[in-house]
Image (cartoon, rainbow, N blue to C red):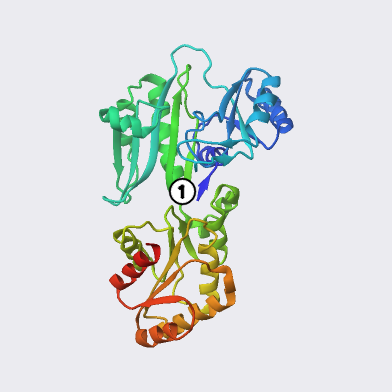
């Protein structure tokens, strides 16, 4: 579950991480009020207006701007709120901005120059360890840093049985070239950031940039956070942070009816029982020369109602040109699934305007094939993997 920058900063602050302070606003009037409140609380004279969407690269798309007075706060907020913000991480049409964060200016003059760093905490799946990735090149896309100056990216792997050790936090501060009070601040920052990552059951915390201010404080200027969906049962306070306006509406609808659905860019819709078989089915489609339009796991109960719901979800994608149903009848009998497909097709009438290929294997697979072949419905049946692929290819050729 992705959350907004201001929400990520709330989590960080609750674990003692110093953050760039800000107040969220839903319209220009609230933005001006937030700016006044922020000035009273922090003394900031300038304000940073930051679009709140679930995507990085907002500055490049015009979603982050500096306001030097209250009039500019109002004008810039009016420009950003409601815009379709396009960044390298949004769909081609962009994402609508529904709110902005009015943040304090932290690039004030002082005894030393400001410096920007990159830091993220995530899971290294290959080694089953958490990992802190960091770089002196903050404010830049980490992919560009990795491509052009990979020697400037450092990693610190953490054994989950003992947690982050003091020497590791000190090594990070040393590799970032810090000394004096900034060094001590960075050690504390790293420790608190890691505690926030573990304590919130996050799958990623990315802070870009981590700022060393002119008076040698270390703070998070941005926060890109992903909370592990599987942990939300024990993190109810974070469940409320979900903003479904930022999510794919088809995926949201599928989740509400208990279907595991991920929208993709292809033309062949998939309806499968079991995640492993779903992945294999997508491979099958690619081997046939096409691209899957979705990942959809209907689970073990593929009755008529569930199949019909899955059909309607898949067909909401206008790019779907054919649907491949691939069911292994272990828990559920193939003949019951076949009857469910036929009944769902009848119930939907003319709503289905694309070829349907059904591959059933397992208990009563032959009976299931006869049910479909004798149904009078324009549904193609198969029992073998390759046979199903060939029928997809024929239907789309």
Q: Quadrant of residue 379?
A: bottom left
Q: Quadrant of the C terminus?
A: bottom left
Residue visible at 51% across and 32% down in the picture: 58
Please provide percent x and percent y for residue 27: 70, 35
Depth check, front residue: 167 or 134: 134
Depth check, front residue: 107 or 67: 67
Depth check, front residue: 235 or 149: 149
Can you say whether 50 is above or below 354 in the image? above
Look at mark 1 in the image and give the residue it sits on. 199
Res 108 visible = yes
Can you say whether 40 is above or below 169 in the image? above
Please provide percent x and percent y for residue 187: 38, 31
Depth check, front residue: 147 or 122: 147
Residue visible at 42% across and 32% down in the picture: 188
Q: Quadrant of residue 186?
A: top left
> Mark 1 falls on what kind of element?
helix
Residue visible at 58% across and 34% down in the picture: 51
Instruction: Count every numbered label the image shows and give the total.
Output: 1
Res 363 visible = no
Residue visible at 42% across and 45% down in the picture: 204
Can you say whether 81 is above or below 36 in the image? below
- Along the horizontal axis of the image, is 310 left or right of 75? left
Q: Quadrant of residue 26?
A: top right
Please provide percent x and percent y for residue 84: 59, 37
Are there few (<14), some (14-19), or many (20+) residues within 10 Å of tag 1?
few
Please provide percent x and percent y for residue 150: 27, 31
Can you say whether 95 is above or below 293 in the image? above
């Amino acid at each position: 579950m992705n959350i907004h920058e201001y929400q990520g900063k709330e989590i960080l602050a609750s674990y003692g991480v110093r953050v760039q302070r800000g107040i969220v606003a839903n319209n220009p009037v609230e933005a001006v009020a937030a700016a006044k409140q922020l000035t009273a609380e922090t003394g900031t004279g300038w304000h940073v207006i930051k679009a709140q969407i679930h995507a990085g690269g907002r500055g490049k798309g015009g979603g982050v701007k500096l306001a030097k007075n209250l009039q500019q706060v109002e004008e810039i907020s009016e420009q950003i709120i409601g815009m379709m913000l396009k960044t390298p991480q949004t769909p081609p049409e962009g994402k609508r901005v529904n709110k902005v964060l009015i943040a304090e200016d932290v690039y004030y003059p002082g005894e030393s120059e400001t410096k920007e760093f990159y830091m993220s905490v995530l899971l290294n799946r290959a080694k089953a360890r958490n990992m802190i990735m960091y770089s002196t090149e903050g404010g830049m896309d980490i992919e560009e840093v990795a491509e052009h100056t990979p020697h400037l990216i450092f990693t610190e792997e953490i054994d989950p049985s003992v947690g982050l050790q003091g020497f590791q936090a000190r090594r990070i501060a040393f590799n970032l070239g810090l000394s004096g009070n900034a060094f001590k601040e960075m050690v504390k920052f790293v420790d608190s950031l890691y505690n926030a990552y573990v304590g919130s059951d996050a799958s990623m915390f990315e802070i870009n940039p981590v700022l060393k201010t002119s008076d040698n404080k270390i703070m998070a200027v941005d926060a890109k956070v992903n909370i592990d969906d599987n942990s939300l049962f024990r993190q109810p306070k974070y469940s409320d942070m979900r903003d479904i306006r930022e999510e794919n509406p088809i995926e949201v609808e599928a989740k509400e009816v208990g279907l595991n659905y991920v929208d993709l860019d292809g033309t062949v819709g998939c309806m499968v029982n079991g995640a492993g078989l779903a992945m294999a089915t997508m491979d099958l489609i690619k081997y046939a020369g096409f691209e899957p339009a979705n990942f959809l796991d209907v689970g073990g109960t593929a009755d008529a109602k569930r199949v019909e719901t899955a059909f309607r979800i898949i067909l909401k994608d206008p790019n779907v040109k054919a649907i491949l149903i691939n069911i292994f009848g272990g828990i559920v009998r193939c003949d019951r699934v076949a009857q469910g497909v036929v009944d769902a097709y009848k119930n939907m009438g003319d709503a289905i305007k694309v070829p349907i290929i059904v591959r059933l294997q397992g208990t009563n697979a032959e009976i299931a094939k006869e049910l479909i072949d004798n149904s009078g419905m324009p549904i193609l049946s198969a029992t073998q993997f390759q046979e199903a692929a060939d029928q997809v290819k024929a239907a789309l050729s």
